[in-house]
Amino acid sequence: MSDPIVVSGLTNQEFFDTHARPGRIGLVGGAEITNRLIARAQRHLDADGAWSHWSHAFLFQGRRADGHHWIIESDLDIHRKIIRLGVQENRIAKYADDADYPVVGVIDLGLSPAQEQQALAQALELVSAGTRYSLREIVGTVWALRHPKWQPRENLLGQEKAFYCSAMVRHVMGLAGVNLTPDITEKNTTPEHLWRMPVPHTKWLIARERKPGPLRRLAGRLRKPVPKKG
């Protein structure tokens, strides 16, 4: 596993502006409770049981005519009564809030121009096909994380034409000729697997302290002694 280049003093947007390039992989760790649960589930990959930094992975598409960096990702996106469940295109500004996403990373595999084009073409094909997000496969992957002998096997709850985030990244990179995690099946691949991939790469990291989530803040208030009256 390659050591990351740790970056400080940049906002998320500045970090992405510096390191985002077409065909590179992006990772984020969110502060919201669902993201924390995903990070916790990946603790089985660490010898000491440490939580993963990561809760989501995506593919950088490049800067477009609007001047923004765009990404391709498989996500659950609920915004102003519009619900998108599956592979989609979004601006990287979605992950620009430093408090909401205190941990961000970029991985450069050093793809050839042909590999880069193939990975992006395959990802756009998934967008065009309306490929769904797979909650069911996440459950199968959590099982495999808890029972490591299942990680090299097919996901027990695998679905056709469906991917969660890191499985989608693994899939399109495989079609471009790069097997990111040879010992783990495609649909058991987590964001932490991508971060630890054995394939030669360069990666950059910003890791800020996460703000306490709502449950932790509530627990902290309950632990405070109640002042006596009088």
Image (spheres, grey):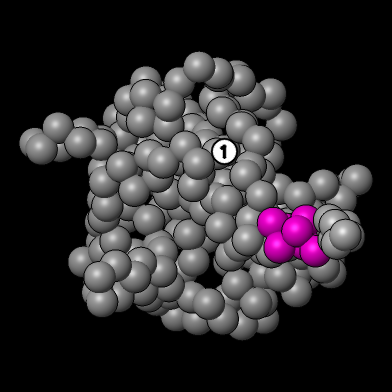
Return the x and y of residue 205 as percentages of the image width and height. 57, 28
Q: Secondary structure at mark 1?
A: strand
Point out the residue furthest to the left here. Answer: 65
Residue range of the region highlighted in magenta in the rendering: 216-222
Instruction: Look at the picture and state if 52 lies above or below 185.
Output: above
**Callout 1 crowding tier (Cα within 10 Å): few <14, some 14–19, many ≥20:** many
Residue shown at 63% from the left, 24% from the top: 4
Q: Residue placed at 35% from the left, 67% from the top? A: 77
Q: Identify the residue at horizontal 84%, vertical 69% (top origin).
A: 147
Q: Is residue 146 above or below residue 140?
A: above
Q: Is residue 227 above or below residue 211?
A: below
Residue type at tag 1:
Val
Majority SS type along the magenta span: helix
Rendering coords of residue 113 (x, y %)? 30, 30
> Residue 177 in the image: x percent, y percent?
45, 44
Query: Does residue 197 appear in the picture of this structure?
Result: no
Point out residue 152 in the picture as x, y percentages from the top left corner.
73, 63
- Residue shown at 58% from the left, 76% from the top: 137
Q: State the image quarter where residue 34 is shown.
A: bottom right
**Disc 1 target residue:** 103
- Please say whether residue 60 is visible from this viewpoint: yes
What is the quadrant of residue 66 in the picture?
Answer: top left
